[in-house]
Image (cartoon, helix red, strand yellow):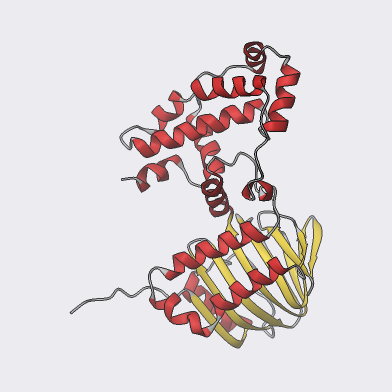
Amino acid sequence: MFSTSTRQQIILRSNDMRCDDFGALFSKMFGNRYADTPPPPGHIIIGGVYGRHEGVSFRRMHYRGDFSVAFPDPVDEITFVIPTAGKIVFNHGAESVGVAHVGLAIDKADIRSMRFIDNHAQHGISIKRGLLTERLSTLLGKPILQKVIFEPEVDLNAPAFQGIKALIDLATGTEFDLLINAGTLMPSRLREMLVDAVLEAWPHNFTQALRRPAPQIAPRHVKLAIEYIQEHPDNLVSGTDLARLSNVSQRALQDGFRRFVGTSIVAYQRQVRLERAYAALVDDTSTSVTDVALRYGFSNVGRFCQYFQNAYGISPADVKNRRR
């Protein structure tokens, strides 16, 4: 006789519930994630499908009535909204307006409030920023030293966004419920598919890097500097000294890095040091985070951990723990 473990369901289905009833069901399944947010008026009706699993949520929802929601605390997620009816307005200093042909990518850390107007309906995905960074780092094979910024407004008539919408339809369809709610593998696979779909289809500042254009051949002075940095990751050499080693002016070397490497000399050095630190944490779990940080020139361990988390979407300690 085999025993099976009971796992909490990750799909909520609502057939036009009053908002307070919907809120109670939501809190029971996913915790009171919006405890500090004032509830909508009691007459608002909410219906649709909402799913959440390990930092990613997906939804196909509709709202009957106009109302506003305030966000007193920032949330470290990016939300991608594909409106199918009515209008949604995000207030983050300025205003972003989503309608049936305009999709929005919103950094929820910047949101102050949002409004649902004209019986708004939507397909949507929300993803923790760290998950996007972690996946992007894996796909590109390097630390991500710039904040990932998505195009805030897109034309939903483009086929790529119809593909995202179709994926949400699949995830929220009743046919998928058995696999999602009873299985152990599919929720994680679905989460990865949603993250990859957004990174692939929604334009952002790493889109061209993901498409892997043919690499440009760097000139000799840039290659010399790159080789030196790669061979001496613990040596924090200045741009002036690198230029002297490469027999060019510092300005010429800086321009060469920006054109052929796509980043500054300082940022490239940090990238290499973080790559070596990541490899050291993976290869030798007995080495402490502090030792690795100091080995690769990070004298401030707290700052190293922050750089590492921002670059890989995961902390140095978590990398060590994963390999044990």
Residue placed furthest toward the bottom: 15
The structure residue drawn at horizontal position 72% and vertical position 17%, both measured from the top left corner, is 250
The structure residue drawn at horizontal position 68% and vertical position 48%, both measured from the top left corner, is 208
x, y (%) of residue 229? 55, 22
From the viewer's perspective, is 253 left or right of 227?
A: right
Q: Is residue 146 above or below residue 134?
A: above
- The reply to whether residue 37 is in sight is yes
x, y (%) of residue 128? 57, 57
**Quarter in which the N terminus is drawn:** bottom left
x, y (%) of residue 123? 66, 74
Q: Report which quarter residue 117 is drawn in.
A: bottom right
**Quarter in which the C terminus is drawn:** top left
Q: Is residue 1 above or below residue 195?
A: below
The structure residue drawn at horizontal position 62% and vertical position 77%, both measured from the top left corner, is 60
The structure residue drawn at horizontal position 57% and vertical position 79%, both measured from the top left corner, is 49
Q: Report which quarter residue 220 is drawn in.
A: top right
In the image, 125 versus 193, the foreground residue is: 193
Residue placed furthest toward the left: 1
x, y (%) of residue 35? 57, 67
Q: Report which quarter residue 294 is drawn in.
A: top left
- The reply to whether residue 23 is in sight is no
In the image, 237 versus 99, the foreground residue is: 237
Count of numbered circles on the image = 0
Q: In this view, does 295 lie above or below 17?
A: above
In the image, 76 versus 223, the foreground residue is: 223
From the viewer's perspective, is 44 left or right of 26?
A: right
